[in-house]
Amino acid sequence: MKLSNNRTIADCWLPTFENVAREFIIENLKNILSSDKTPNFKFDFREEEAIEFIEDIIKRYIDTFNGYDFKEETQTKYEKLLEKIKQKTNENEATPVMIVNDYKKFFEYLRQAYEKHIELCFKRRKNSTSFYSWDKNNFFELIWLRATPQDFNNPEEFLKKQAEMMKDTTFEKYDEETYLGKLECLNNHIITIKNGIARTWDENFRQMEITIYDKEYYTNKELWNRPHYTLPVIRYGIYEKDGKKICSIGSIQHKRDSSDEEKLEKKVDRQKYRINKDIPEEDKEKVEPKNLIALSIFVNLLHKEGITDIEVPSMYVLDHEYHRKRNKYLLKEFKEEWTKVDYWDREERQKREKYPEDYQKAYKNFMKMFRKEDLISEIKTERQLLTARRLLKHYPKANITAYPEEIDNYMHMQIPVVKDASEINGELLKELYNLVQALDIEKQEDPANQEIQTTPHKNKVDDKWIEEFFSL
């Protein structure tokens, strides 16, 4: 079926209740139950009507194979799937169990979230006109990575909240990269913000991207890659509860951008510790200053929208298993990519030999992910909670209204709107606050739109790389 702007999607993948239920049950449920690539968990559909609904979908699907030699094989496969669904669970289950009390709500909210997912896929890939099978399957199989223990007991509410956050347009005005200003503490280099689109396996569908550009090259948009450094992204979702907007911060993470400029990164690293001035040692532990800087900018942006309530999750049920299972695929993909022979090269060199600098960066980013499931889980939970709590030292009027497990699996915070920089502790954060306060989309003057510079940018080549890695 053709959508607007010549975009197409298969009729059977359109976001209807029937399509979503069928695709999820026929294509994705078996992978959720037993795939060796993604985390596994079980579903406990509590309504008899739900089992009948699933059974009917499977029966109608099998009937489409009438007259084919492999109908019997297909029937056996889906009979086993149905048997697993019907299997009762108990409290001693080692595998996580998702309890569905209202299957109609479950599939309807899944449909609503899927509909927005389709829109975001086309928006993220601006020049793409097709919606692919992996777009659909990734959504149905990986959205559960964001679920907390409480969400497993109430997936209907979890999906409803996901759909609401995806529909929110609070920061839509920053969907295109927006000039924020010059950072005096960084030799007047340029800082920008962009309301980016995250992936299904990330902790939220939207992410605030804060980028620092080299001032010498920022205005030259003819450059394919202007020298820049991106701070850790804030993956977030905004939804409404009791008439009030609440911001859920799923993660604060570095994007592993191989195009980051090392010189700028080093300058940021030299300045970031200014944020620790006069802070007790116990409040510095496991708090990455760059994460805190990015979070402070984001809080200031929330304040411009009048949002003062923040929640931070304390645990993701499936996260550790997901990253543990990814290890062998990360290694396989990395080796295949960098041992490719470039046959257009007269010497037929491997890609890692032809592009040593790119290889070095890619290897560095790879090793930050490979066999790091324990660290990644800690960063997303304990360290993130500590970073959020650290805000109390810089925003003295802020307070924690509930700790994890007091009312749910989130830490809840309230940070009243800051009216003046004097209400913030820390010179660096005060400067960032003033930049955000001065932000006015309507009257904005971005120097990149006013002048063009043509200073050539030369990449520095490092001829060293790590051969022993390929013995892993």
Image (cartoon, rainbow, N blue to C red):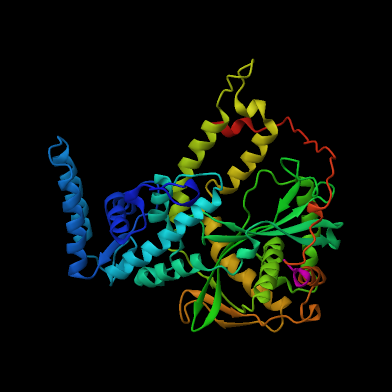
Measured along the vertical axis of the image, is residue 341 above or below residue 25? Answer: above
Q: Residue at x 41, y 70 (%)?
A: 160
Q: From the viewer's perspective, is 255 left or right of 396?
A: left
Percent x, y for residue 184? 86, 62
Instruction: Please state the extent of the stretch shown in magenta in the rendering.
Output: 436-441
Percent x, y for residue 151? 40, 70
Percent x, y for residue 193? 69, 60
Q: Using the rendered image of the protein, determine whether residue 144 is visible from the camera's viewpoint.
A: no
Please state which of residues 84 and 101 is positioned toward the viewer in this rendering: 101
Residue 272 image-quadrant placement:
bottom right
Q: Using the rendered image of the protein, determine whether residue 21 is visible from the camera's viewpoint.
A: yes
Please state which of residues 459 and 13 is positioned toward the viewer in this rendering: 13
Residue 303 image-quadrant placement:
bottom right
Q: Residue at x 73, y 71 (%)?
A: 281
Magenta-drawn stretch contains 350: no
Q: Residue at x 65, y 26 (%)?
A: 353
